[in-house]
Image (cartoon, rainbow, N blue to C red):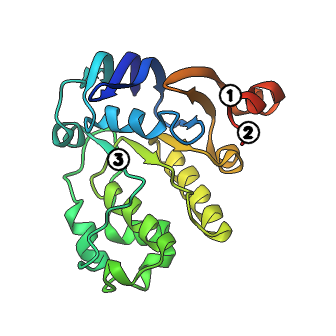
Amino acid sequence: MLEVSRVNSAYGRAHILYDLSLSAKRGEVVVLLGRNGAGKSTTLKTLIGLVRALSGEISFGGRRIEQFEPYQIARLGLGYVPEERRIFTDLSVMENLEVGRQAPRAGAPQWTPEKLFQLFPNLAGMRDRPGASMSGGEQQMLTIARTLMGNPSAILLDEPSEGLAPVIVEQMARTILELKQEGLCVLLSEQNLHFANLVADRAYIIEKGHIRYQGTMAELAADDNMRAAYLSI
């Protein structure tokens, strides 16, 4: 579903990603792990087109997208949930969902507000509540729900567990596993190894813009040296 080959990215003169390669399949959850500043968010922004790749190839559903604009990539069915959430705080839950609506697409799950309220029961009782009156966890749920209204076949989640209460983190983990069951391809960036262990099939570790590790979560759990070198504080 997603195939990234030898991608380089930069902010101005600051080179951030170096020959980065990774992949994620339909119905698979892949996590990009690393410390703050390692290049996780830049990776997702490069995939969605917010940061233009200097070189390399990005394929989504078999189609090259590295030269596309973000809106073109979104229309192809790649969803993106930013770390900053960026809901419309003056709009209600229902209005935020309508902003994200796209037509159903072949090969992707179809989402309606009612189906999303089953996925996010916390949102069901606050359909008319403005975004500004929601907690951080509720806003995170709304951001994901709004992205799903675009009926994506793959979704990028930037630090979905950051700043959330433990009970909301557990709910978020269940949500990601349900998205996997729906057949979505999920690529998320994370620092929370416990959360990654709950949801991910495979992991990549990024450090200073370089991929330092790739393997299953079970293999990473058994590799104390790798975790100590690149994930410990």
Q: CA distance from mark 1 to mark 3?
A: 24 Å
Q: CA distance from mark 2 to mark 3?
A: 27 Å
Residue name at image x 25 percent, y 22 percent: 63
Work out whether mark 1 precedes mark 3 in sequence or the reverse, and give the earlier one: 3
Residue name at image x 42 percent, y 80 percent: 134
Q: Which residue position holds label 3?
A: 80
Residue 127 placed where, x, y %? 34, 82
- Mark 1 lies on a secondary structure that is strand
- Mark 2: which amino acid? Ser
Q: Which mark is residue 149?
A: none
- Mark 3: which amino acid? Tyr
- 1 or 2: mark nearer the eye: 2
Assign the N terminus to one quadrant of the image.
Answer: top left
Q: Nearer the viewer, residue 202 or 6?
A: 6
- Mark 3 lies on a secondary structure that is strand
Is residue 13 shown to the viewer in this render? yes
- Mark 2 lies on a secondary structure that is loop
Work out whether mark 2 precedes mark 3 in sequence or the reverse, and give the earlier one: 3
In which quarter of the view is residue 31 placed? top right
Q: Which mark is residue 216?
A: 1
Is 164 positioned to the left or the right of 4 in the image?
Answer: right
Q: CA distance from mark 1 to mark 2?
A: 19 Å
Callout 3 crowding tier (Cα within 10 Å): few <14, some 14–19, many ≥20:
many
Q: Which residue position holds label 2?
A: 232
Residue 78 placed where, x, y %? 31, 40
